[in-house]
Image: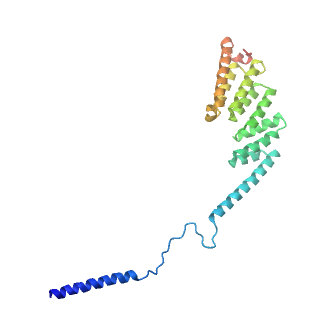
Amino acid sequence: MVSLFITALAILFVVGIGLYFWQKSVPDNSERVLPPNAGFRGLFGEDSSSNEQERKRLAIAEHQQEAALLIDRARNGDRAALGEAHKTGDADLYDRVLNELVQGTDSDANLLSLMSFITQNELPVNSRLAKAVVASWQKSPNRSATTKALHFAALSNNADLYRETVEQALELWREGKLTGMSAIELRALFEGEFWILSSPSRRSGAGFILKRTLANARRELEATIVRSPRVSEGDQSKEGPP
């Protein structure tokens, strides 16, 4: 019995080994299928990168066409083009449109009208417009024009331009040509408009020089106020240069 049992185990062992090697020798006819590439569009599908480049090209062409139309409208005096240029978010295009409008102002009245349009619509001021305002102010440096010149110079966010305007105003005041503006008012105007400049502009190298200019102007104007202690608030507009 024991010999029969051992023989049966041996037969089962041999059969098991045979089955193992037989299954291993059978070829695997099943194909290994990989998932398709995420960007695959078939043999005749369109290339997504080419489509994206084409869309960008069309967008650029459309923007250039719109820019040309806005500039042409501004050249013909259409101020509404300025607001539309601002809405595009293209700062360079906005400057070009505004420059065309400034160039088209052939009188102080037209320039004042453009200034009012920009102020009412809360649109940015660039250096070209601010310089035009300052040039107009120098012809008639009264109190109102002085306020506007300094305000627009500050709105341009150009620290050098604002410093130059402050220096010009101070020189006109010394010469007695800045009518209707007292030392106290001029000092307050200088310092108040300074804060319209952006923080980066105030912290720049040009901003540092501007701060020194304002400090010197403050000392000069305060010295005048100290030397004229009896001048009342109502008579301060009559103050002359130091």
- Placement of 68 over or under 34, stated as above or below: above
- Residue 14 position (above or below residue 71): below
For the point 73% across and 36% down, the residue is 127
Left or right of 215? Residue 107 is: right
For the question of whether residue 180 can be seen, the reply is: no
Q: Residue at x 31, y 82 (%)?
A: 17
Give the quadrant of residue 100: top right
Give the quarter of the image for residue 218: top right
Q: Residue at x 21, y 87 (%)?
A: 7
Place of residue 5 in the rendered image (x, y in percent of width and height, measured from the top left): 18, 86
**177 vs 18: above or below:** above
Q: Position of residue 156 (x, y in %)?
A: 70, 35
Q: Position of residue 129 (x, y in %)?
A: 76, 37
Residue 84 vertical position relative to residue 159 in the rendered view, above or below? below
Quadrant occupied by the C terminus? top right
Residue 194 in the image, given as x and y percentages of width and height: 65, 29
